[in-house]
């Protein structure tokens, strides 16, 4: 398994390309902008993108979905609680910065416990609401992609529409901190970390462990 991390869009969200290094099958997580750059990277590696996986429906994580789907034919997948945000600039918050990000509707509606397969890689979907009602994290082997739920030294905002502080802390406690300490965390913004490091150093998690 290979992972490519690209900082994209107006807010520098992390977009990840995960691919099987033998078959070349791939998934793109959170193409939040700079679609041409993402496509160029896919083309340079001759990857076959099967899925576009969205950790939630905010514009800075979805803004290149349409272009990427058009160029790759990949299926768009998002949790049911955030699915309507793809076509709603108020729900995806793009209206707040004076743009209208309208993306294609989902091909796949995700639920907690679903699995997405690329090559022989299994990507497990866990529902981690709090930043948004349909926020998910994605586990693959010793990695977890946490979107805007858990960051290095911080957690996702809960002051936006649909946010809930108690809910995000419960999601982190019950569905992320239960992972092995060596699990590498690839967040929606900023540098990667590990579950063990966050248990020790993340001030927002005090009292959860």
Image (cartoon, grey):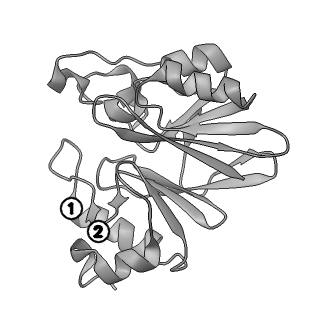
Horizontal side, residue 104 vs residue 94: left or right: right
Q: Element under label 1?
A: helix
Is there a contact, CB below 8 Å, between mark 2 and mark 1? yes
* Residue 94, percent from left and from top: 25, 24
Horizontal side, residue 131 vs residue 74: left or right: left
Which residue is denoted by mark 1 in the rendering? 165
* Residue 188, percent from left and from top: 39, 48
* Residue 87, percent from left and from top: 38, 20
Which residue, as the protein is rendered here, is positioned at the far front? 44
Q: Is residue 105 visible?
A: no
The circle drawn on residue 33 is: none
In this view, 183 is above or below 29: below
Which residue is denoted by mark 2 in the rendering? 169
Horizontal side, residue 68 vs residue 193: left or right: right
Residue 57 occupies quadrant: top left
Disc 2/disc 1 C-alpha distance (Å): 6 Å
Question: How crowded is the residue under tag 1: few (<14 C-alpha within 10 Å), some, or many (20+)?
Answer: some
In this view, 109 is above or below 103: below
* Residue 157, percent from left and from top: 21, 52
Which of 140/163 is in front?
Answer: 140
Residue at the spot x=22%, y=72% of the render? 204
Horizontal side, residue 195 vs residue 154: left or right: right
Residue at the spot x=34%, y=86% of the render? 209
Residue at the spot x=23%, y=25% of the render? 90
Residue at the spot x=17%, y=17% of the render? 98
Question: How crowded is the residue under tag 2: few (<14 C-alpha within 10 Å), some, or many (20+)?
Answer: many
Q: Element under label 2?
A: helix
Residue 44 occupies quadrant: top right
């Amino acid at each position: 398994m290979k992972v490519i991390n690209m900082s994209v869009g107006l807010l520098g969200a992390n977009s990840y390309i995960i691919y099987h290094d033998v078959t070349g099958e791939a998934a793109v997580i959170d193409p939040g902008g700079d679609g041409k750059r993402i496509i160029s990277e896919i083309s340079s590696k001759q990857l076959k993108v099967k899925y576009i996986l969205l950790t939630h429906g905010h514009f800075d994580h979805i803004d290149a979905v349409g272009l990427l789907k058009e160029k790759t034919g990949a299926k768009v997948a998002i949790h049911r609680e955030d699915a309507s945000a793809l076509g709603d600039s108020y729900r995806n918050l793009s209206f707040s910065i004076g743009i209208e990000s309208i993306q294609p509707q989902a091909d796949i509606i995700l639920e907690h416990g679903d699995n997405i397969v690329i090559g022989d890689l299994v990507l497990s979907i866990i529902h981690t609401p709090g930043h948004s009602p349909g926020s998910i994290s994605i586990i693959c082997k010793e990695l977890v992609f946490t979107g805007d739920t858990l960051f290095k030294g911080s957690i996702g905002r809960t002051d936006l529409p649909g946010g809930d502080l108690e809910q995000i802390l419960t999601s982190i406690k019950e569905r992320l901190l239960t992972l092995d300490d060596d699990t590498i965390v690839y967040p929606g913004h900023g540098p990667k970390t590990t579950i063990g490091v966050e248990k020790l150093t993340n001030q927002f998690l005090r009292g959860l462990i």
